Image (cartoon, rainbow, N blue to C red):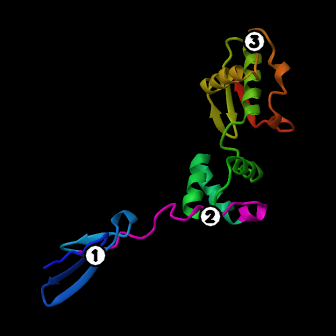
Amino acid sequence: MYSSGSGHGQNYSGSYGQGYNQSYQQPYQQQGYGGYDEYEGYEDYGTYQQGESSKSNYIRPESSEDWEPYRQVISQLYKTHKLKDVMEQMETQYGFKATPRQYKGKIKQWGLDTKYTKTEEYMEMLKTKKKMEKDDPKASTKFTVRGKAVSDASISRFERRAKKRGILPNEEGQEYDEYEDYSNDAAGSSSGAQWSQS
């Protein structure tokens, strides 16, 4: 026998064989606290909700010391996730909130920016490819960056985008050597690109 009360929650009282009696207070299911099942009794679905912390409780790093406790987890996440996904997980699971610019600075400082081919590396490969094709049009050039093969299609995509952005000449016949100062990030850096010709 059951009776329900008024309001947002519902009070249940029931009788289950062998003289076993219990009363239940059914909470809001949308809050993630579970619900009442007529045959199984109260089910606890768990009280944890991602993002339930208020914005005022976020950890907003202002110094290197603020980053250090999270360095290992960020490093592990970044190996298999995109930056935006890393940021989302750090915010929802750890309450750690930083700007994309802050993350990029730390990723570079920690030496984690090696999984993507850098602009200067693409430039080096493109210039080398053009030179080798000019010297021997029939030759085939294979490029690798930190042991990872870089396809001709990937280099061609970079070339198209670089031309749209104005860091490469659009007209045929212009030498790419004129555009060595294409990026401030490339200053003082060394390319990890290697190539072989067949």
Residue 190 appears at what percent x and percent y? 82, 38
The residue carrying mark 1 is: 42
Circle 2: element type: helix
| Majority SS type along the magenta span | loop
Name the foreground residue: 71 vs 1.
1
The label shown at residue 56 is 2
Are the residues tagged 2 and 1 within 8 Å (C-beta)? no
Disc 3 or disc 1, which is closer to the eye? Answer: 1
The residue carrying mark 3 is: 134
What is the number of callouts on the image?
Answer: 3
The residue stretch that appears in magenta: 41-68
Amino acid carrying label 3: it is: Lys
Lower position in the chain sequence, tag 3 or tag 1: 1
Q: CA distance from mark 3 to mark 1?
A: 76 Å
Residue drawn 49% across the image and 61% down it? 50
Residue 38 appears at what percent x and percent y? 19, 72
Disc 2 or disc 1, which is closer to the eye? Answer: 2
